[in-house]
Amino acid sequence: MRKREIENQEHRYLNRSLWSNLQSLKSTVSFMQTGAHPDDEASRLLAKLSLDYGYHVSYVNAVRGQGGQNSIGPERDDNLGALRTFELLKAMSVLRADIGWLAENRNSSIVDFGLSKSAEETFEFWGKDYTFQRMVRLVRAYKPDIIIPTFLDINGQHGHHRAITRATIEAYDNSDNSKIYKDSQFKPWKISQIFLPAWGGGGGAYDDEEDPPEATHFIDVGDFNNVFGGTYNQIGEWSRSYHSTQNVSKLAYEDKLTVPLHFLKGTNVEGDITGGVIPKNLYELSEFSKDKSGKHLLIEAHKYSLDAIESFNKTDQLITNLCKLQKLLGDAEKSFSEDQVHRIQLKQKQCSYTMADCIALLPSLSFISNNHFVGGKIKANLSIHKNNKFNISNLNKKIITPFETDLSFQHKINISSNRLNYIFEGTINQNTTYQDLYQEWHGIALEPSGLHAKVKFNVNDTNFSINVMPNENFTIIPNIIGSLEEKKIINIISKQNKNNETTKIPIKFLVTKFSSGSEDLVLNYPKDWICDNPILKLDNNNNSEAISYHTELQVNSQIDEGLSKIFLTSNGTRISEISEFGYSHTGNILLENDCELSILNVQTNDLSGLKIGWIDGHADKAWKWAQMLGAEVRLLSDDEIISEDFSKFDTIVSGVFAGASRPIHKVFNKINKWINDGGNYVTEYHRPQDNWDENKSGPYFLKIGSPSIRWRVTNPKAEVGFLDPNHIVLNHPNKISSVDFNNWIKERGLYFAANWDDEYKPLFMMSDKNEQPLLGGLLVANYGSGRHIHCALNLFYQMDNLVPGAFRIFANILKS
């Protein structure tokens, strides 16, 4: 495996960055797209507008994506939201686009709660007024001239998308109204143009009930960009490939392609999305000067901006042009009113980043330690490449922190003859933790609110300034942290246990203390439980080595069904856990979560003696719950799927999405023979694209519904009808009743079957409000001496959230 730091150095793509920044100098137009989720952006459109037209592009996104699917790993909820946040940051960096978030922090009500079928339902979670206020704030912050939502507000579309489209139109109508959505930081702003997508939002997920509106404008994204080595459509797909958790990218070829737009409000001019009312460049902006001097300065600045672009590969000329441009912009700034001066200020920033690329400054901000804790030390390295070919002087550097610290510059060292390293050291002087991930915006137009360095430098007596973001996500963690091998377990309440018996539950925490000084940690548990050693004494050391704390809890064997929480406290405050995860395309992520053991005391028959072969799709961990229920589970490798003798297994499970990545399609006949001989084959929910063959994936015909919005039940409280209450799957080993569907969260199920052979028997029917009942949530077919069960109920998610009834249904599916 290649070393990551060497790969990163190889892939700096300085010429791409320089060329991209140069394009920004030719336009004064600002374009904003809005979307609900990371990956909603129309990447090919943004690529064209940013990298060819030179527009300043911003993408305003609502949620962090914590409620979506994960095609590459087990991360869910906030951990998935963190991954998808990073994916969007990486995706937008390809397009030279800024990002704004409606969900500005982790606790925002604008959360990805799962698929919604209406804007009204979405606003029940998000808050309609709050959503509108957040959208208007970001419009006032970025000052876009043109705005477009990604989706249409029509039936059959995701409710989150519809809510954002309404918020976008509201922002167009009212962001200039000083009497509503008051904001002390940003003044009202009038958007000139609003468009709607003239493309459909269907595909395999949604089902727009109306055709898209007529296209009034077309943006050509099929042009080939020689610097990037692809068309703008291809560049868009390169950007989308960073959304790996969503598996949305595809290989694009060199095609003639346009993106259709529908003019909604503003000034409609054929072939010009600016409507002729927005200054397109510095020359046109000069007409807005308050005096002749400012007008003359911007006319000259326009000339040098074009000269700079023309001198892309002529470094000395480029430096001269950029210096003259920067000085002219600085002199002209005072001649423009508040409603236009932001264009000049943004151009100065863009000129600075262009110069940094031109002289190959290549700044880097890194930290010596991966772990920064409350009250601990912090040491930062800010390094730059100082090429002696260029007249670089007056280098001023500062690290700006959003937390309390005395971090300051200490000394400079030479990493190499031409790379300087500035070392900053200090102490973290606050008692609260910090996560750099959750910022309100990212990019060039607005000053970052997170940790960053500001580097000012002078080239040929001209001043420039850039912000440098950390190479890795920066986190301040608590002084004491804990971890658990399993954060959620079950305690089976067996009918065979007697009331005077106790069950012993082993408890193991790993605790790490970073600072010196002794500390007593106290184990917290239900008052009627028994623990012999509830105190963990931490010695006076700070070697940061994890200490293992083992104990045992005794609980009455006939405890009532319900959830119990076990956790450690330090001076009355719960200790936290730091989840560490990440992938090559995101980098490492640290996220603070509760360090607590959740124990579900559940009444269910166990699966002892059951042997299961599990084909894992890496999208869920239901196999762990099968193990906790007592089954002997073997995770099958690809070779074992093809060559293993299945007769040793009672049940085989194809996990969620397993068909997409595992060679199940190569062993259909083998599986069917095994079922015929008495095996119990369980398929968790799959999408049509997961190599699902409606004629071969089961012993009989079974078709997965598409588009998925029509074949899912998003209301977790939807009434469930029992179609065959006496069926063995609903009675062995547990008696299933309507109680088992209480307290479900997020949804009932998804990717329901749409059609099936008569041999399959549907066991449940359910639906969302005002929709026809769906019967394809749980299907059972006998085949020879065995059985195939197809389950589109979202059982694994319910079990992950310790919903008791899901365990009983799950046990029956595996063992009946």
Image (cartoon, rainbow, N blue to C red):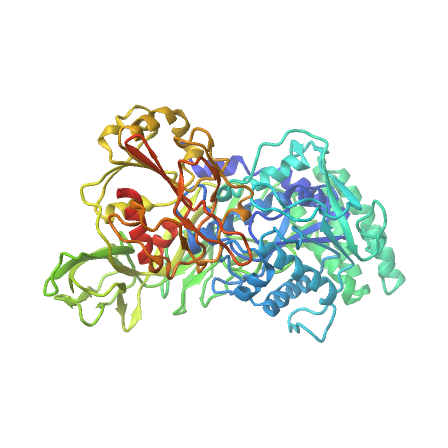
User: Horizontal placement of 284 versus 721: left or right?
Assistant: right
Counting from the top left corner in percent of width and height, residue 657 is at 43, 39
Q: Residue furthest right?
A: 292
Say above or below: 336 vs 474: below
Residue that sits furthest to the bottom in the current view: 179
User: Which of the 4 image quarters holds residue 646?
Assistant: top left
Q: Nearer the viewer, residue 135 or 516?
A: 135
Q: Quadrant of residue 13?
A: top right
Q: Nearer the viewer, residue 299 or 257?
A: 257
Q: Residue at x 40, y 60 (%)?
A: 476
The residue under the point 70% across, 51% down is 56
Q: In the image, is 774 to the left or to the right of 667? A: right
* Residue sitting at x 40%, y 38%: 760
761 shown above or below 558: above
> Residue 496, image x and y in percent?
14, 56
Looking at the image, the residue that sits furthest to the left is 500
